[in-house]
Amino acid sequence: MIVLLLIGIFLGSCFLTGFFRRYAIARSLLDIPNERSSHSVPTPRGGGVSIVVFFLLGLPISFLQGWIELPVMLGLIGAGLLVALIGFADDHGHIAARWRLTGHFAASAWVLFWFNGVAPIEIMGVSLASGWWGWGWGLGALFLVWMLNLYNFMDGIDGLASVEAISVCLSASLIYVLLGSVELVSGPLMLAAAVGGFLYWNFPPARIFMGDAGSGFLGIILGALALQAAWLEPGLIWCWIILLGVFIVDATWTLGRRLIRGEKVYQAHSTHAYQYAARRWGHKRVAMSVVVINMLFLFPVSVFVVLGFFNALVGICIAYIPLAGLAYLMSAGKSQI
């Protein structure tokens, strides 16, 4: 049944993305290249809606099959829909940053309500969060909002946001199987299938872009899946944070440098490490390099952490220090002026 569902999600997402491409071309919903763009020809946008539609359609089926619990389904559907609608509206016009951020925190609150806050998480013997009390609410909301926005920031070249989501979800699923936690597998696998259908059209050279509706949706859903896993096994949150290291480090490093210079961080720019790399080596090579880093480096590190070979802090340092070095070498956050 799970195999049939995944095939249906993949094919549905693929066909719907093709429909949205024709719709975007007919309505002239195109990304026009400018000095900050990483593409050179007008390209349809908004194809990420297909990811939203078919992942959310898969959730009730997963619930009826007993693969996910009702609160998880409701949390993912409500937050995902809200973020996708905000992104869709922004793709077709413009929503002020303060209103977008308000909506993002509302979506995060929805997830935390249905997830009963954040699971008790410890690092080096210190409790960082516990349910609705202490740091649980604040840390959970900030984590989800940052995941949502950093995914928007990192969706700037062909195929990158798609291959990141697929490789991270497949890696997490393998870890769940390794631990015997198969009850967590359906969410990441459905998301990977939905993104896979879209990737058929988005692989370099892209024939359609994801748009904010898709990238923001992926960010908050990936964050929510990480919080869901932590309730079953607290150590799994660190696996997700390690697996998402390429996006987290690049986005955080770039944002930090721009903040230090006093720039308006919500304004469009093209100073991420991956953007500098794409201009040097091309979109396809950068996207596939991220897959290699995820599967051959970050995945083994996350496995060692969850199996207890070393603690979470050591694992994050092992994963993030080389990534920070790459960000520095690629001039992440460096002004182009």
Image (cartoon, rainbow, N blue to C red):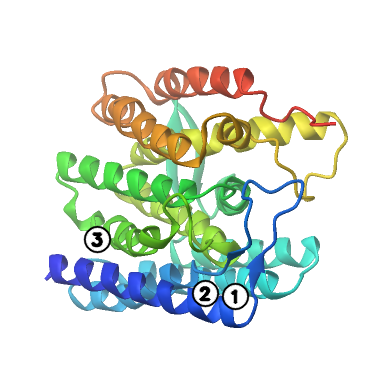
User: Percent from the top left, x then y, of residue 91?
Assistant: 66, 69
- The quarter of the image holding the N terminus is bottom left
Along the viewing direction, whichever of 42 and 226 lies nearer the viewer: 42
User: Percent from the top left, x then y, of residue 169?
Assistant: 33, 49
Can you say whether 12 is above or below 252 in the image?
Answer: below
Q: Can you tell which quarter of the image residue 98 is in?
A: bottom right
Q: Which residue is mark 3?
A: 186
Sequence-earlier tag: 3 or 2: 2
- Residue type indicated by callout 1: Leu
Q: Which residue is mark 1?
A: 85
Q: Is residue 143 left or right of residue 59?
A: right
Q: Residue at x 40, y 26 (%)?
A: 312
Residue 74 appears in the rendering: no
How far apart, in angstroms, are the residues tagged by discs 3 and 1? 24 Å
Tags 3 and 1 touching, CB below 8 Å: no
User: Percent from the top left, x then y, of residue 208?
Assistant: 51, 64
How far apart, in angstroms, are the residues tagged by discs 3 and 2? 19 Å
- The quarter of the image holding the C terminus is top right
Q: Residue at x 53, y 55 (%)?
A: 132
Near mark 3 (Cα within 10 A), the count class, few <14, some 14-19 or many ≥20, is many
Along the viewing direction, whichever of 238 and 158 lies nearer the viewer: 158
Q: Secondary structure at mark 1?
A: helix
Sequence-earlier tag: 3 or 1: 1
Q: Which residue is mark 2?
A: 81
